[in-house]
Amino acid sequence: MSNSKRINYIDIAKGLAIICVIIGHTFAKYDKLDRLVITFIYSFHVPLFFILSGFFVKDQTYDVKKTIIKKAKQLLLPYAVINVLRYITKLIIAGFSIPGLKNFILSLLYANDSRAHTKFCIIAAPPIGMTWFLPALFFCQIIYICLNNFARKYNTSIGIIVVIMGLVSYGLNDIIWLPFSLQQAMTGLVFYHIG
């Protein structure tokens, strides 16, 4: 039997956030009333996931290598498996093509939820869909522990560093669209720190 205890209100909040994601992605293309509901849901559901994830961060110095391996297993492995299964399904339905494979690989690496809306984009990749959240959370967590280690080593406020990074990434949205969901990860740092 496990010694870990579940925190009921965190589990309830996660469940509500998951329901909101499902509602948001299911009813996103309907009438104006639905658009109001969807806009409301989109205003908090992803930040809530970052906040809830940040809730479990300990104030300590982390082993970056071990954390990267652990988080990659938790977040990047499911990301790859889900999207490879989606690609196999697409192959069965539409057949194989070199451009299709190229688009899949680019979208997998770019890991964004929508097409770049900027003038400068490192890779012109199609969106990966809602699984973009997994690499965004992975990079958010890795960046955060690196910043945390830095702040502890140099006796600096991590809160200030996180806010600056969040503002910089948000400010870059109209200039450049970075791969690997890095902008979403850096903006998510603020919410992760709040948790």
Image (cartoon, helix red, strand yellow):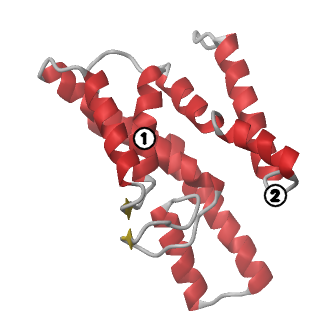
| Res 160 → quadrant | top left
Is tag 1's residue or tag 2's residue first in the polypeptide sequence?
2
Q: Residue at x 33, y 31 (%)?
A: 163
* Residue 145 location (% of width, % of height): 31, 31
In this rendering, the count of numbered labels is 2
In the image, farthest residue toward the front:
32
* Residue 187 location (% of width, % of height): 42, 41
Q: Is residue 111 left or right of residue 60?
A: right
Q: Which residue is mark 1?
A: 187
Question: What's the distance in space between the residues labelled 1 and 2, CA to CA?
Answer: 26 Å
Q: Residue at x 79, y 48 (%)?
A: 35
Q: Residues within 10 Å of mark 2 (few under 14, many from 20)?
A: few
Q: Is residue 193 left or right of residue 66?
A: right
Q: Residue at x 55, y 67 (%)?
A: 115
Q: Is residue 163 left or right of residue 37?
A: left
- Residue 72 seen from this side: no
* Residue 138 location (% of width, % of height): 45, 43
Secondary element at image label 2: loop
Q: Is residue 55 above or below residue 131?
A: above
Q: Is residue 118 above or below residue 149?
A: below
- Residue 47 seen from this side: yes
* Residue 46 location (% of width, % of height): 60, 38
In the image, farthest residue toward the left:
154
The kind of residue on which mark 1 rests is Thr
Q: Residue at x 56, y 33 (%)?
A: 47
Q: Which mark is residue 29?
A: 2
Secondary element at image label 1: helix
Q: Is residue 182 above or below residue 99?
A: above
The kind of residue on which mark 2 rests is Lys
| Res 69 → quadrant | top left
